[in-house]
Image: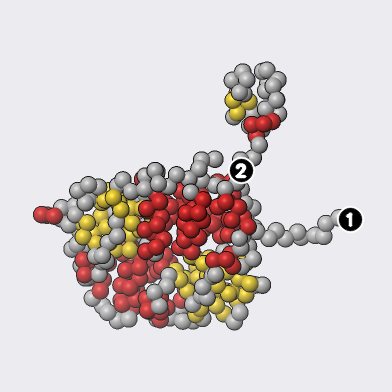
Amino acid sequence: MTACPFCGSENTEGADICNDCQHSLTHLTHPALETPVERGLMKDRIEVLSPKSPLTVSPQTSISEVLSQLVTKSIGCVMIVEGDELQGIFSEYDAVRKINVDAAQLAERPISSVMTSAPITLEAKDKIAFALHKMHVGGYRHLPIMTKGKLTGVISIRDILSYLSERIGMSA
Amino acid sequence: MSFLSLSTESVSTAYPDQPLFVTPTSTVGEVLQLLRAQQTGSVLVCGDGTDEGKLLGIFTERDALKCMAAASADDKEVMQKPVSEVMSTEITSLPADASMGEAIKTMSQGGYRHLPILDDDGKPTSVETVYGIVHYLVDHFPQTIYNLPPNPRPITSEREGA
């Protein structure tokens, strides 16, 4: 609701004139000026974050192999790829949720049995705002980045945070 | 639209999580199950007895992953170990009156995902997560993020026009 600045009565959001006093309300609904951060989010492409090349494994790789790779390379997720096609993603979150205390029993099972299949992907040409949207709304930590349908990179929520913190530092 | 005031706003505005506490003697297996049941990414290991409430260490998903890797590579004992043997003891924390700017800087420079917030006595009151900070930032430009279409590249199923 918008309060009319002339008579104070409440009007529907976006109304052109006040219901009570007929004064024009159009000046109230001018779009707010964008901040440089917002402009950047809508203008910069995901390429700007220079997505890291992902660690890829085949669906048959054993769980113990994947876990040890995640630890030794100190990364948070692997992409499961068959041929050229992205089959799934396996992250720390999946490990805690699906493996947990059964790590010893599941050690020899293929990674495809615990991966998250058909993850949400974005193209390197997409704007950063979409990446932030997907991560924030979906609660994801990593997003696979494709170029022309092929997996080429991965971005994490840390990349987004450091992008934002740099920009905020500039404008604040 | 409100403007970011990172130096004046307190870190407590950025959706800090309620902390999960465990004692140093809890086993790794118990803590892992707690992480899964509570769907969080970290637990705080706090002293009991004489140093009650004092923050001794933090155990995050990263530490959990290391334990799971060890367990899957034939280390049978790791799940029975007390959490105090595997937790991270070098803790970066924030005072309760820290500003948002400090929190964001600490988190993005150190590459942390969880920062405990301590009160004046050094006792943890909450945990700031990277998701909370992102949520806080998105709150300052909701139109840019929430008004986006679900698909960045909409595909029209049929050719437009006659």
Q: CA distance from mark 1 to mark 2?
A: 39 Å
Is residue B30 among what the camera can see?
A: no
Residue shown at the point (64%, 53%) measured from the top left: B149
Secondary structure type for disc 1: loop
x and y, in percent, of residue B105 in the image: 40, 57
Is residue B81 among what the camera can see?
A: yes
Residue that mark 1 sits on = B162
Tell whether A14 sits left or right of B83. right
Chain for disc number 1: B
Residue shown at the point (45%, 63%) measured from the top left: A158
Dot in front, 1 or 2:
2
Residue shown at the point (30%, 53%) measured from the top left: B94
Circle 2: residue type: Leu
Q: Residue A33's mark?
A: 2
Looking at this view, is B2 or A119 the one in front?
A: B2
Tell whether B27 sits left or right of A8. left
